[in-house]
Amino acid sequence: MLDCSASMWGPMTRTTTRMDVAKGILTQLVDSLSKVPDLEIALRTYGLRAKRGVKDCKDTKLEVGFDIDNVAMIKKKIKEAKPNGSTPIAYSLSKCGEDFPDNKSKNNIILITDGYEECDGDPCAVSAALQSRGIILRPFIVGLGMSDSLLQQFECVGRFAGAKTAEDFRKALNHAVSEVINVTSVTVNLNDVNGKPTETDVNMSFIDVANKTVSANFYQTLNKLGKPDTFMLNPTIRYDLQINTTPPINKKGVEVKRGEHNIIEVDAPQGSLQLNHKTWDKFQWVQCLVRKAGGAEVIFVQDVNSTHKYLQGSYDLEVLTLPRVKMKGVRITGSQELPINIPQAGRLEVSYAKDMIATIISVNGKSEEWVIDLRGGTQPKLLEFIYLQPGTYKIIYRPFDAKNTMDTKQQEVVIQSAKINSITLK
């Protein structure tokens, strides 16, 4: 987007104006870009059509739209441009958002200007809105003959560079373009308990800070030499990195340097938790709730008879047997596997002489804990199976249609692993 406001007639050198410099260098750049594969360019101007001295805050136009063969037309429009109007930067940026094709291309704006917003717009808000919608990655601003204090006003809009000479402008413009089209390599080191980058096979999400969307997803991989593999990443984006371990690791504000190999170090020592539990049949499904030690949030639900990796640390386990098996402060150490053996259940078979309401209470010394309500009899001789952890239990029950609380009865049963205990409630 080229500033064609009247101030561009200002001198860049003793013999050339800012517009002269911008035209010459921009034309050379467009020529070089025509040879870059998979790249389309467009040209928008502002301040070009208003009459001199007239403040037109909607004076912007897409001179040449995106296409694969439009360099000649862009050069023609650059050559013909004669500065006239004012500087509606915010409005022009918002119109840029409508210029990009509706596809999955990586979209960027390079703004070439020598001045500040003159139409009471908010370029920072417009830039943030465009980025939040994923329309542009991050604008670049190349300031011609601008003071450092004026350039600072563009910090919230995007990356900026000042140019006080023609050579400064050439370098700044080439740098901005290079950031868009050059590839940048990245390695993520997931360090183990010894500080070595051996942890692997973990999903990594690179989240665009500007619009809070996931820009890239990768699985961390070790190459054939056993070293963390290298991948390419867009250097124009500032990222929040989420390593999807259990629990996740978040690294905020990651910036990668264009044209360099970037190494991102993350401490991620992991150990494995192996839950072992003999079940009565292959269809019996038991799970375990896992929380950070002392925490309330469930960070993972692990199936028994499975192994899962966790970050090194202490965890509280709650196995969803009857009653629940609770283990506090289980310590998982990096690069080690911790086996947890859950006692095999016994089976209680309950039959009913008549319709009943009943509940099972776990007895542990002087303390008692409710375990589960039974279905009760819906017809004579109904048989109900309940799988219980080894221990002592009370069955509290009464006839469904009883009118007297004193009709409540109880039976005590002792459950042993892999044993069947049968009772009848009468």
Image (cartoon, rainbow, N blue to C red):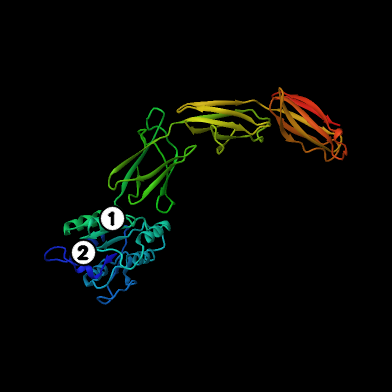
Q: Rounded to the nearest whole Å, what is the CA distance between mark 1 and mark 2?
A: 21 Å
- In the rendered image, residue 121, in percent from the top left (x then y), is placed at 36, 65
Q: Residues within 10 Å of mark 2 (few under 14, many from 20)?
A: many
**SS assignment at label 1:** helix
Where is mark 2, residue-wise? 22
For the point 28% across and 63% down, the residue is 116
Where is mark 1, residue-wise? 152
Residue 35 appearing in the image: no
- In the rendered image, residue 324, in percent from the top left (x then y), is placed at 65, 31
Q: Are marks 1 and 2 in contact (CB under 8 Å)?
A: no
Residue 258 appearing in the image: yes
**SS assignment at label 2:** helix
Q: Which quadrant holds residue 120? A: bottom left
- In the rendered image, residue 235, in percent from the top left (x then y), is placed at 33, 49
Q: Which residue type does callout 1 highlight?
A: Gln
Q: Residues within 10 Å of mark 1 (few under 14, many from 20)?
A: some
Q: Is residue 73 left or right of residue 298?
A: left
The relative height of residue 279 versus residue 401 in the rendered view (above or below) is above
